[in-house]
Image: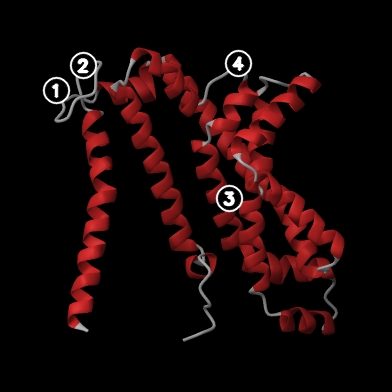
Amino acid sequence: MRRLHWAASLFMGLAAVVVLMPIVVVSAAALNGGRSMAFPPENPTFDRFVEFFVSEPVWTTALWNSIVISVSAAALSVLIAWPVAYWLWRANDGLSKVLAGLAAMPFALPPIVFGVGLGFLWSFTGALGQMWAGVLSLAALFAALPLVTISIGLQSIDKALLEAAATMGATEGVSFRTIVLPQTIPYTMSGFFFALVLSFNEFIVMFFVSSSSYATVTLQIFNSLRNGFTPTMAVAAITFITVSVVAFSLVARFGDLPRLMGADTTRR
């Protein structure tokens, strides 16, 4: 058992090194004083961070676009998923299953297929290149995430509570407001954060639906590649990592992470 313990510890340590080393290299590369990335950094400075967050309009605009689009898309995906998940939980009939399947289908498709399809759709409707079209596209793509987390939260509710509330005269609306909603808030927020992180990092779908009318951070990285790899791109990568770590830490702190990961929490 002791050997197995040491082997497991060694494996986890090696896995941590493999994961952390690229992050360390990218973080150090962002400190380069010149316009090219080098490791170790040459003439270390925080000027590239100032450019990305404050002084360079190309990057600050792209960052603002990413924030607006990802937050809006994540919120809209939750609004799309909630009624579908609730109907599936309450009725569990054929129509609710079909709607749940349709809501999850975009996430199951290859992103390039979904992106090309949306490009044709928005071009036909005249909305290609509109930011709101990008929000709708990402919301449709990632609605499957809050649909899953909210469904897990609904399934964790003891229906005996609802039956007791109905016995005492509570309407379905009152039961939803006082029993269902409070118990599913962590799962709703988890779905929101999952959709937020993936929307913030999405490139393929945004490439097709933006039509070069606006740029998110991921698109701006792609546009800047013609000038080679620059330290500012490393700052963008650090931003992606930070957003992901913060979001998933919030999920782990306030959500039911074991159940979201598929663990059977009823077993001891």
Labels in figure, total: 4
Residue that label 4 marks: 213
Say if mark 2 contacts mark 1, CB within 8 Å: yes
Residue 157 percent coordinates (x, y): 67, 75
Identify the image quadrant of residue 221. Answer: top left
Give the mark nearest the N terminus, 2 or 1.
2
- CA gap, disc 4 and disc 1: 35 Å
**SS at badge 2:** loop
Q: Quadrant of the N terminus?
A: bottom left
The residue lying at 30 percent from left, 26 percent from top is 49
The residue lying at 74 percent from left, 20 percent from top is 123
**SS at badge 4:** loop
Residue that label 1 marks: 42
Give the label on residue 106, or none. none
Indicate whether 202 appears above or below 256. Answer: above
Residue that label 2 marks: 34
Residue that label 3 marks: 192
Q: For the residue marked with disc 4, what is the amino acid?
A: Ser
Q: For the residue marked with disc 1, what is the amino acid?
A: Glu
- CA gap, disc 3 and disc 4: 27 Å
Residue 106 percent coordinates (x, y): 68, 44
Say if mark 3 contacts mark 1, CB within 8 Å: no
